[in-house]
Image: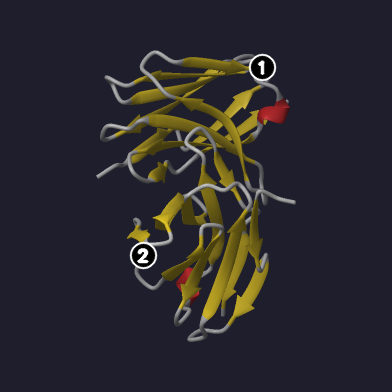
Amino acid sequence: DADVTQTPRNRITKTGKRIMLECSQTKGHDRMYWYRQDPGLGLRLIYYSFDVKDINKGEISDGYSVSRQAQAKFSLSLESAIPNQTALYFCATDSGNTIYFGEGSWLTVV
Amino acid sequence: ELKVEQNPLFLSMQEGKNYTIYCNYSTTSDRLYWYRQDPGKSLESLFVLLSNGAVKQEGRLMASLDTKARLSTLHITAAVHDLSATYFCAARDDKIIFGKGTRLHILP
């Protein structure tokens, strides 16, 4: 099994729809992250969490929300998707010495 | 607030040449990461540097860290086509912030 699993891997959604991206990890780490990748902009941090009760905004949290359902699960929601949220989204967990990434979720908002 | 800057953002080079990618970060960081990404793929860990003066090498890649200058470098020796990829550095305070990446294109 993959260390970090993201679902869905690909999604096309319409403007205004709510969508959730899910992430689960098998590493047992407390720290989890959601990043967004756009061409030429690198990875930008959306939200990060140190444990179930500790969730923090990152660089670009507007328009997004998250839920840490358990140590292993960290979900990202777009409450009302807009076209400029079209991007590749990565979930990650951090051991301190290594950042483990999921395979990414391609989201297209039309 | 932690910021991470990489340069250059794009690099085209000939096989056999040497080059260096630079990564500056703006505030104290307790570690510096280097990652590689191939097109359409996730990120692959290359190095983590934990202390001032740290140097790590793997094949043709060598990374170093100067915490006083808040600078890390990734040096490529005698580049080969297989090293063509995008390289990211990232620094950590309480969160992990990435640079914009350096897209490396190695010409045969």
Q: Position of residue B8 (x, y in %)?
A: 44, 32
B75 vs A56, left or right, is right
Comparing B76 with A28, the one in front is A28
Vertical arrangement, residue A89 with respect to residue B23, above or below: below
Q: Position of residue B63 (x, y in %)?
A: 50, 20
Q: Secondary structure at mark 2?
A: loop
Q: Position of residue B105 (x, y in %)?
A: 62, 33
Label 1 marks a residue whose chain is: B
Q: Position of residue B76 (x, y in %)?
A: 57, 19
Q: Amino acid at mark 1?
A: Gly
Q: Quadrant of the C terminus of chain A?
A: bottom right
Vertical arrangement, residue A39 with respect to residue B12, above or below: below
Which numbered tag is attached to residue A61? 2
Rendered residue at 55%/56% (across/down): A90
Q: CA distance from mark 1 to mark 2?
A: 38 Å
Task: Report which residue position mark 1 lands on.
Answer: B59
Rendered residue at 48%/32% (across/down): B33
Q: Amino acid at mark 2?
A: Ser
Quarter of the image where one finds residue B97? top left
A100 vs A57, left or right, is right
Quarter of the image where one finds residue A54? bottom left
Label 2 marks a residue whose chain is: A
Q: Secondary structure at mark 1?
A: loop
Mark 1 vs mark 2: same chain? Answer: no
